């Protein structure tokens, strides 16, 4: 039990490493939360810093989720509830990072990593569907929501373990809550599309 609590705490601290904030500070000496959409994530990094830094942020943010789950699987002898809890903790750390005044991103890349480690094929299929949606619409937020909704459905259909389904459902709910502003903008036709103008002016898109 103590090991499980320690692993969850370590996963939260790992998730709290906000690579978009760190890289923006290193590359341009700015706090990325003061620019673009104000979100500490890969999409806003793309908008503010360009493709290279955005790809690095995307990979590292996803790696946090993978690492948290795999570490739990190793040290907790594959205990599924602990693995699921550590994946959730890493995403909570990304969204509310202790190192950065609890103001982080929306957690989609870390969610992808955690779910890929928990349930690879459902995450893969949901990811391919999300990519298709983004390619067709150029709305990253819509693709993110499609991924969040499709993953638990696929986990259920493929009859994967209950702890993984429970984690995916929580992550789906969390993704929709974190994207509530984006949902409103999608419905009103005001959401920014991928490839929109890059800049460093602060806004709430």
Image: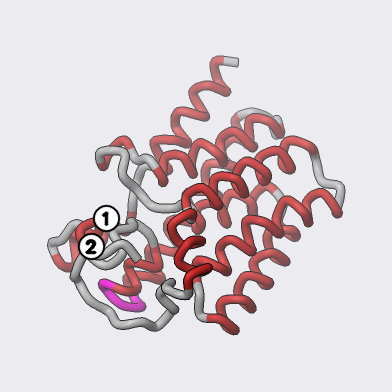
Residue drawn at x 66%, y 40% is 167
Residue drawn at x 18%, y 61% is 26
In which quadrant of the rendered view does residue 54 lie? bottom left
Q: Assess whether residue 123 is covered by the magenta stretch.
A: no
Q: Write the start and end of the magenta stretch as one range.
A: 48-52
Residue drawn at x 60%, y 30% is 75
Magenta span main SS: helix
State left or right for residue 179 relative to residue 131. Answer: left
The picture places residue 19, in percent across and down from the top left corner, at: 33, 55
Q: Nearer the viewer, residue 129 or 120?
A: 129
State left or right for residue 3 relative to residue 164. Answer: left
The residue labelled by disc 1 is 21
How many numbered circles does the render carry? 2
The residue labelled by disc 2 is 24
Q: CB atoms at circles 1 and 2 under 8 Å apart?
A: yes
In which quadrant of the rendered view does residue 3 lie? top right
* SS at badge 2: helix
The picture places residue 101, in percent across and down from the top left corner, at: 25, 38
Q: Residue 28, relative to residue 70: is it above or below?
A: below
Distance Cα–Cα, label 1 vs label 2:
5 Å
């Amino acid at each position: 039990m103590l090991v499980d609590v320690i692993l969850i705490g370590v996963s939260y601290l790992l998730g709290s490493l906000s690579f978009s904030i760190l890289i923006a500070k290193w590359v341009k000496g700015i706090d990325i939360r003061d620019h673009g959409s104000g979100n500490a994530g890969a999409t806003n990094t793309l908008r503010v810093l360009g493709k290279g830094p955005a790809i690095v942020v995307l990979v590292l943010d996803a790696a946090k989720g993978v690492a948290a789950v795999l570490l739990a699987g190793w040290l907790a002898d594959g205990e599924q509830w602990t693995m699921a809890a550590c994946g959730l903790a890493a995403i909570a750390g990304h969204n509310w990072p202790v190192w950065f005044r609890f103001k982080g991103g929306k957690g989609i890349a870390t969610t992808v990593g955690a779910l890929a480690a928990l349930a690879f094929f459902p995450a893969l299929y949901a990811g391919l569907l999300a990519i298709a949606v983004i390619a067709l619409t150029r709305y990253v937020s819509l693709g993110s929501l499609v991924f969040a909704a499709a993953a638990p459905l696929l986990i259920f259909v493929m009859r994967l373990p209950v702890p993984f389904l429970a984690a995916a459902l929580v992550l789906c709910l969390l993704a929709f809550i974190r994207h509530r502003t984006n949902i409103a903008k999608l419905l009103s036709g005001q959401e920014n599309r991928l490839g929109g103008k890059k800049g460093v002016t602060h806004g709430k898109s």
